[in-house]
Image: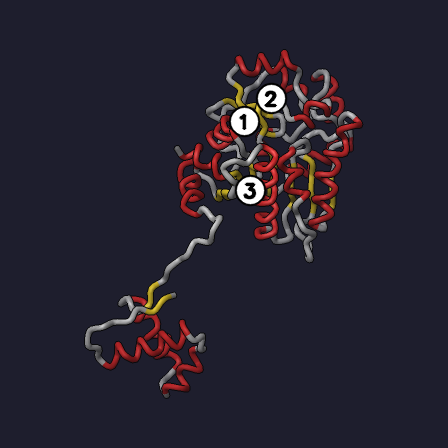
Amino acid sequence: MTVTHFTRPLDGQVRLMTKIARMYHERGARQSEIAEALSISQAKVSRLLKRAEAIGIVRTTVTVAPGVYAELEEQLETRFGLTEAVVVDVGPDADEAETLASIGAGAAAYLEATLGGGDRIGVSSWSQTVLAMVDRLRPFTVRGATEVVQLLGGIGAPEAQSHSNRILGELARMLGAEPVYVPAPGVVAGPEIRDSLLADPSMQEVTRHWRSLTMAIMGIGSIEPSNVLATSGNAFAAEERVDLIAAGAVGDICHRIFRADGSLVRGSLDDRIIAIPVDDLLHIPRRVGIAGGPRKLDAIHGALAGGWVTTLITDLRTAESLVE
């Protein structure tokens, strides 16, 4: 709040409003203290403060802090129908690793600011960006969520397995939540194996958790897998990716492949995936997508176009490209 000083002659009422406004907004006096000091009722103080704002004696100004891109975030929210966009400041010369670290830090800050303790959170297993968030998250002093559930099969090659376990285990520990693991790989050899695994009681229990999630935190993948995903045993083969690209695929969320317009690419690959079903995923009220950098631009745009996420956390350059 700022108090505007008038230079024209003032009547007594305007003078009193100005005095009260200065005492309240500039000196921090409480309304009861002002009423006692000026020998008027507290109701009159409140009424004159409201009138001072109405006639322009008091004006509200919002100063945007450095590194906050409120206008750009609002443009993303309006254009893509997002509930919230978070744009992270990244230097113009930042490489992919620096961009990843900045987005991870921004996502960690977002969780620290928004989690209330009652959420049941689903998390994608093989995302480097989600791992960057977990690595920068500070332990919550009070419980941040009740449970953290894998959204995609979490079993993979031994040399990459620690990545998946670290995302879920560390996030659950930081939030004081219960971890729920998927006791299966993300991609299996055929639909018969998938159906057999999904029928197992342990997977039936995971399915129950999927259907009660209130929030999802997900990386947005490009068709070319990250190094971690490529070595995990949970990536599609090169010849399968060729077929996906021919079908118009640009990206994936939890191995659910989509085109530039966000539409789902269906086919035999879908029958080999052990992950939250699309309908269950899209019923989660808050779906947070975390991704950025030039390599992910088409995938992020497709995810936004298809309504796969309700909240996007990305870097400055990617956000600017998305609204152009």
SS state under label 2: loop
Q: Residues within 10 Å of mark 1 (few under 14, many from 20)?
A: some
Question: Could you give the CA–CA distance between mark 2 and mark 1, rounded to whole angstroms?
Answer: 9 Å
Where, quadrant-wise, is the C terminus in this rendering? top left
SS state under label 1: helix
SS state under label 3: strand
Colour mapping: secondary structure
Q: Is residue 283 visible in the rendered structure shown here? A: no
Residue labelled with disc 2: 224
Please, is residue 42 above or below residue 213 in the view? below
Q: Position of residue 306 (x, y in %)?
A: 48, 29
> What residue is at 30 percent from the left and 68 percent from the top?
4
> Is residue 178 shown left or right of residue 119?
right
Q: Position of residue 117 (x, y in %)?
A: 64, 53
Residue labelled with disc 3: 286
Q: Which dot marks residue 295?
A: 1
Q: Position of residue 151 (x, y in %)?
A: 66, 34
Please, is residue 17 above or below residue 147 in the view? below
Q: Are marks 2 and 1 in contact (CB under 8 Å)?
A: yes
Q: Are marks 2 and 3 in contact (CB under 8 Å)?
A: no
Q: Amino acid at mark 1?
A: Arg
